[in-house]
Image (cartoon, rainbow, N blue to C red):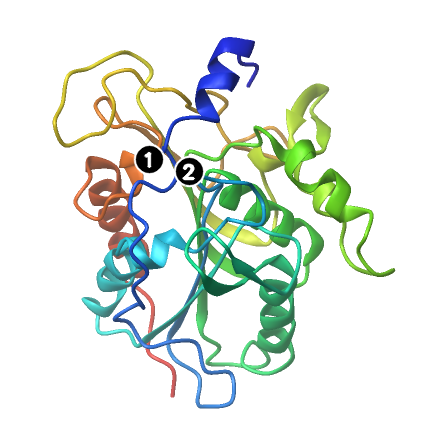
């Protein structure tokens, strides 16, 4: 999505992606790859930090602290499924400390390492755990990149909350050149591809190893609300997700009429209510692992 320079400048001074800087752990059990497999593994990636912020060094896992991860996990535990979760920040490296919140964070390299271990252990054979992905803003771009570069790994549900590539080259261009040989370039996450002859951002491509994609987009028009963020939405996604063959098989989209780019992540939001309702329907047929 192209944005005017004024809107881009406003984005950098609005606390849209992290209105709360309270760091809280998830109430759902954490991912433990050394233990027995749960029924569902939920992996989440948060987006770009808000003001005061110097991305990517200040990015952090706000989806966990905000309770968004627990809200999504609850939809699965309500189906009698055992869930383990792990949250990551929008950053190429495995670990760093966010100076914004002063706590250690895990980035894409850590996510990739966890997925590799999952693939080599729990995802082999029958009775494998279901894998659910949850991303907001830049976090959605990271997760589309993850599914792209792990074509043999099955992902049952991918949830996109207003996926955005804005500021990607500036955030990660210099850092990507310092990565060791063999690491995945973070710049690939926002490549432009041709899907049935049309230029499409790779963050909008749902890859064949993803069974179901639930996409949320925030409001387009100004609305007055005390609980749904700013009256005028400063950033929103317009392009719908698509399969490589140009179809939307297994893809569902919800456009929130009242919530801005940040508000769609709130546990009690209209957007999360739709996501958890649809996720519960999808998971209703899942069986528990032996």
From the viewer's side, name the closer residue of 190 and 154. 190
Whether pointer 1 and pointer 2 mark residues with C-beta atoms closer than 8 Å, the reply is yes
> Residue 126's spot in the image, x, y percent?
51, 81
From the viewer's side, name the closer residue of 128 and 52. 52
Q: Quadrant of the N terminus?
A: top right
Determine the residue located farthest toward the left in the rendered image.
Answer: 226
Residue at 66% from the left image edge and 62% from the top image edge? 109
Say above or below: 96 vs 217.
below
Check disc 1 and report its element: helix, strand or loop.
loop
Check disc 2 and report its element: helix, strand or loop.
loop
Q: Which residue is mark 2?
A: 50
> Residue 243's spot in the image, x, y percent?
58, 36
Determine the residue located farthest toward the right in the rendered image.
Answer: 181
Say above or below: 116 vs 52.
below
Q: Quadrant of the C terminus?
A: bottom left
Q: Which residue is mark 1?
A: 262
Tell me the distance, in whole angstroms, between the alpha carbons under discs 1 and 2. Answer: 10 Å
Q: Is residue 223 left or right of residue 166?
A: left
Residue at 74% from the left image edge and 39% from the top image edge? 173
Say above or below: 178 vs 111.
above
Q: Quadrant of residue 97?
A: bottom right
Res 274 seen here: yes
**Sequence-earlier tag: 1 or 2:** 2
Residue at 65% from the left image edge and 25% from the top image edge? 200
From the viewer's side, name the closer residue of 284 and 50. 50
Res 244 seen here: no
> Residue 155's spot in the image, x, y percent?
52, 59
Q: Quadrant of residue 141?
A: top right
From the viewer's side, name the closer residue of 163 and 40. 163
> Residue 257's spot in the image, x, y percent?
23, 21
């Amino acid at each position: 999505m192209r944005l005017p320079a004024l809107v881009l400048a406003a984005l950098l001074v609005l606390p849209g992606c992290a209105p709360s800087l309270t760091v809280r752990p998830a109430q759902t059990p954490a991912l433990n790859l050394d233990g027995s497999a749960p029924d569902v593994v939920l992996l989440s990636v948060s987006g770009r930090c808000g003001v005061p912020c110097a991305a990517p060094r200040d990015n952090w896992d706000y989806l966990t602290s905000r309770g968004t991860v627990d809200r999504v996990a609850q939809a699965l535990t309500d189906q009698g499924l055992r869930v383990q979760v792990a949250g990551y920040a929008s950053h190429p490296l495995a670990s760093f400390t966010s100076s914004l919140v002063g706590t250690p964070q895990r980035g894409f390299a850590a996510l990739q390492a966890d997925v590799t271990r999952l693939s080599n252990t729990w995802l082999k054979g029958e009775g494998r755990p279901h894998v659910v992905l949850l991303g907001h803003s830049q976090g959605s771009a990271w997760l589309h990149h993850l599914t792209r570069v792990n074509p043999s790994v099955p992902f049952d549900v991918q949830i996109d909350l207003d996926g955005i590539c804005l500021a990607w080259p500036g955030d990660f261009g210099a850092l990507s050149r310092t990565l060791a040989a063999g690491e995945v370039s973070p710049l690939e996450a926002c490549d432009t591809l041709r899907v049935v002859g049309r230029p499409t951002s790779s963050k909008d491509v749902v890859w064949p190893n993803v069974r179901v994609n639930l996409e949320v987009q925030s409001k387009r028009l100004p609305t007055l609300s005390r609980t749904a963020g700013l009256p005028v939405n400063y950033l929103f996604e317009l392009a719908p997700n698509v399969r490589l063959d140009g179809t939307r098989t297994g893809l569902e989209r919800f456009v929130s009429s009242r919530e801005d780019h940040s508000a769609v992540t709130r546990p009690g939001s209209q957007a999360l209510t739709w996501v958890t309702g649809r996720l519960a329907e999808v998971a209703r047929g899942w069986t528990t692992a032996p």
